[in-house]
């Protein structure tokens, strides 16, 4: 399913609203955007009702988006939160990421909708998915399910849903496999990191925070090495 260059002689496309409503990937994108709006309203309400708690939730959300679930969970535990907040927050953010990225990638690959301001980021995600495609294809759905467990750079649910699309999985099968694997992985990593947090807290009150810093450094190092290995350009516009 390699992307073909844009053809200026293509017939006129349907209006954006019609495309979003009439295609499976469009409806997935709409669902992701609607749920994202609801999530942002919830964050705003939390911040208004309890600014300190709201600030923590916003920080965790940003950390999840930028650095991934391991960093987000460690930050939450270091700030005194438990699994009843950390796990649902990670589930929400990763679900929204999958729905939005899947919709944008598929619409872009089919040349139905192309957002120029997101093209570079989507190209990087698409290229990363193609690099893992052959490996995942050997094991099929099981391989895709396991792939989303890894909280490393250029693995996980966002890349996983794109790989599922490249493998030709139907939308509902793809999202079911990716999201179910993601939820199981989140619970597993939460239990593991919560245990590590408890052990570190016995030695130093700053142990969990130091683990958070270490994870951030590892993520940054992983991104640098990935870009250097694959000679990717910087993200500057």
Image (tube, rainbow, N blue to C red):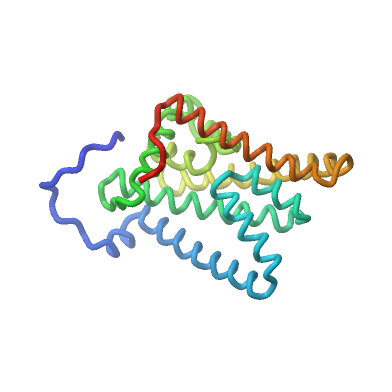
Can you say which quadrant of the picture contains the N terminus?
A: top left
Q: Position of residue 143 (x, y in %)?
A: 53, 31
Can you tell which quarter of the image residue 198 is in? top right
* Horizontal relation, residue 135 to residue 110: left or right: right
Q: Position of residue 156 (x, y in %)?
A: 54, 39
Q: Residue furthest left?
A: 9
Question: Where 213 falls versus 23 (above or below)?
Answer: above
Can you tell which quarter of the image residue 150 is in? top right
Question: Where 194 falls versus 130 (above or below)?
Answer: below
* Horizontal relation, residue 33 to residue 123: left or right: right
Residue at 29%, 34% (x, y): give it: 2
Q: Residue furthest right?
A: 202
Residue at 68%, 37% (x, y): give it: 214
Question: Where 186 falls versus 39 (above or below)?
Answer: above
Residue at 33%, 60% (x, y): give it: 20
Q: Position of residue 94 (x, y in %)?
A: 55, 50
Q: How many discs mark residues in the rendered view?
A: 0
Nearest the viewer among 143 and 232 is: 232
Question: Where 60 falls versus 185 (above or below)?
Answer: below
Q: Position of residue 101 (x, y in %)?
A: 43, 49
């Amino acid at each position: 399913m390699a992307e073909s260059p844009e053809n200026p002689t293509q017939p006129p496309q349907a209006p954006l609203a019609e495309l979003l409503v009439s295609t499976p990937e469009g409806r997935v994108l709409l669902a992701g955007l609607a749920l994202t709006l609801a999530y942002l309203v919830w964050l705003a309400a939390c911040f208004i009702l309890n600014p300190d708690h709201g600030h923590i939730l916003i920080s965790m959300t940003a950390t999840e988006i930028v650095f991934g679930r391991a960093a987000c969970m460690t930050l939450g535990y270091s700030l005194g939160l438990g699994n009843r907040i950390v796990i649902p927050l990670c589930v929400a953010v990763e679900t929204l990421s999958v729905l939005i990225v899947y919709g944008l990638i598929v619409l872009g690959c089919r040349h139905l909708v192309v957002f120029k301001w997101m093209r570079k980021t989507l190209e990087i995600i698409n290229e990363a998915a193609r690099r893992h495609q052959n490996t995942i294809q050997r094991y099929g759905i099981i391989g895709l399910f396991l792939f989303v467990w890894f909280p490393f750079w250029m693995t996980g649910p966002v890349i996983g849903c794109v790989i599922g699309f490249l493998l030709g999985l139907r939308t509902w099968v793809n999202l079911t496999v990716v999201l179910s694997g993601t939820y199981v992985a989140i619970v597993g990593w939460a239990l593991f990191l919560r245990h590590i947090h408890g052990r570190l807290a016995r030695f130093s009150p700053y142990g969990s925070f130091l683990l958070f810093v270490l994870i951030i450094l590892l993520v940054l190092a992983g991104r640098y090495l990935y870009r250097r290995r694959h000679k990717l350009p910087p993200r500057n516009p």
